[in-house]
Amino acid sequence: MESMFSSPAEAALQREAGVPGLLTPLPDLDRVYELERVAGFIRDLGCERVALQFPDQLLGDAVAVAARLEETTGSKMFILGDTAYGSCCMDVLGAEQAGAQALIHFGPACLSPPARPLPVAFVLGQRSVALELCVKAFEAQNPDPKAPVALLSEPACAHALEALATLLRPRYLDLLVSSPAFPLPVGSLSPEPKPLERFGRYFSLAPGRRLEEYGAFYVGGSEASPDPDLDPDLSRLLLGWAPGRPFFSCCPDTGKTQDEGARAGRLRARRRYLVERARDAHVVGLLAGTLGVAQHREALAHLRNLTQAAGKRSYVLALGRPTPAKLANFPEVDVFVLLACPLGALAPQLSGSFFRPILAPCELEAACNPAWPPPGLAPHLTHYADLLPGSPFHVPLPPPESELWETPDVSLITGDLRPPPAWKSSNDSGSLALTPRPRLELAESSPAASFLSSRSWQGLEPRLGQTPVTEAVSGRRGIAIAYEDEGSG
């Protein structure tokens, strides 16, 4: 049986590491994993112990890559193959446990800043891109040469965006090329002027221009993918991009394009439904989905303040990677909020697998803060850091005397009128109210206690004062299969 707070040891031993992927031929190892650049990074730092982090699909090459780097640098390599939460996040804690002085992250990455300072190098991969086919696809979808368009890509295709822009610029006058927003090295200063950072990417906007003015052309994905909605990086872009602006995706192998407007509409509709579920909820479970990303403690405190201000009860749960069996141990929770990196918060969840919906922090903000969304364009924020003070998207909670708390609100799911937060009532002290029980016992009233009282089985009861007192007697001796007072027959 699965433990309430962790996966069983048997499941960890029997779990497959995922799709291993094809092994990279040894002659191509240096090019695919950029080993020359990685070796230079290690030599410049003078590291003696280095951690190498691989996702599941690249673990087959881990031993060969580690051996090649040990041979060229003379440093000791440690392979991190199973992170506690998601492989897109830097496993700084795992690197520190190995005593590593630097971390090399291979594969797709969310590029979230780490919670602890540690030199990190990223190897996103270099997927081949058919530039001529992508140029023809771009021209077919963007006939107006003056229309503003931003070039985006999946992480493994980012190396080809500048070459693609070079082929397009003779005709197209307003192109904006994105680049990966790698975290700044330890002790370095931000560049001036600092480019706009959104969606884990940098955008070098001209003075007076806004990202919301641009359409998007995304290079990435695959025609063989069974469900493109399972790509959290593309979902992040579709949710946050300006509604109404064109958004096209292009397969880098075949040049086949697809209008992503319908998919963006489905994603936004799903998120609006989750906001309604959060507004109807009385008990919220806050899932700690990362411990290595910066400001996760501040974000957790912010979400707890949100739920308290909205008159909801919240519980913080640290369960590692959420699974249906783990979350089923908390039936009194109405919705869960996953506090994770932008890609982890949008990770695909099989329909019907979880008995309660899992939300992103932005959806809880929209449900609990009556002042949300901010005036003007309100993008769907996928990183919890955008909700904290200091962010341009931060919206403070209204004061208690604000009329926003008393605005009538009707649930779009149940059709019922939602009452204002409990603390708004002058005759009710909210969650601190004391409810009389039989035998003149008093207990704090809470949604969890109400849920427990409604269950047919509430656990073992001590039944104090209801059991007759008897003298102690000598019990049985022996073991369960052969007590001394049992016959041998």
Image (cartoon, helix red, strand yellow):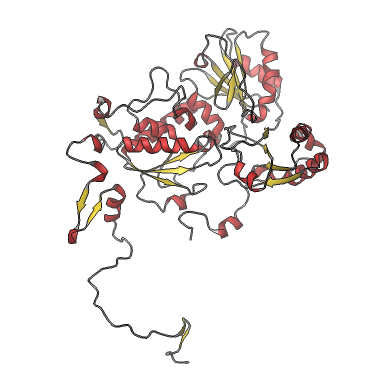
- Left/right placement of residue 471 relative to residue 76 reads left
Front position in the image: 315 or 271: 315
Residue 66 higher or lower than 294, as above or below: below
Percent position (x, y) of residue 270? Answer: 42, 33
Residue 445 higher or lower than 30, as above or below: below
Percent position (x, y) of residue 315? Answer: 39, 46
Front position in the image: 484 or 189: 189
The answer to whether residue 257 shows anywhere in this view is no
Percent position (x, y) of residue 197? Answer: 56, 22
Residue at 34% over, 25% down: 371
The answer to whether residue 116 shows anywhere in this view is yes
In this rendering, the count of numbered labels is 0
Residue 450 higher or lower than 482, as above or below: above
Residue 407 higher or lower than 442, as above or below: above
Residue at 18% over, 60% down: 438
Front position in the image: 40 or 455: 40
Percent position (x, y) of residue 94? Answer: 62, 46
Residue at 62% over, 32% down: 223
Specify the quadrant of the image occupied by residue 459. bottom left
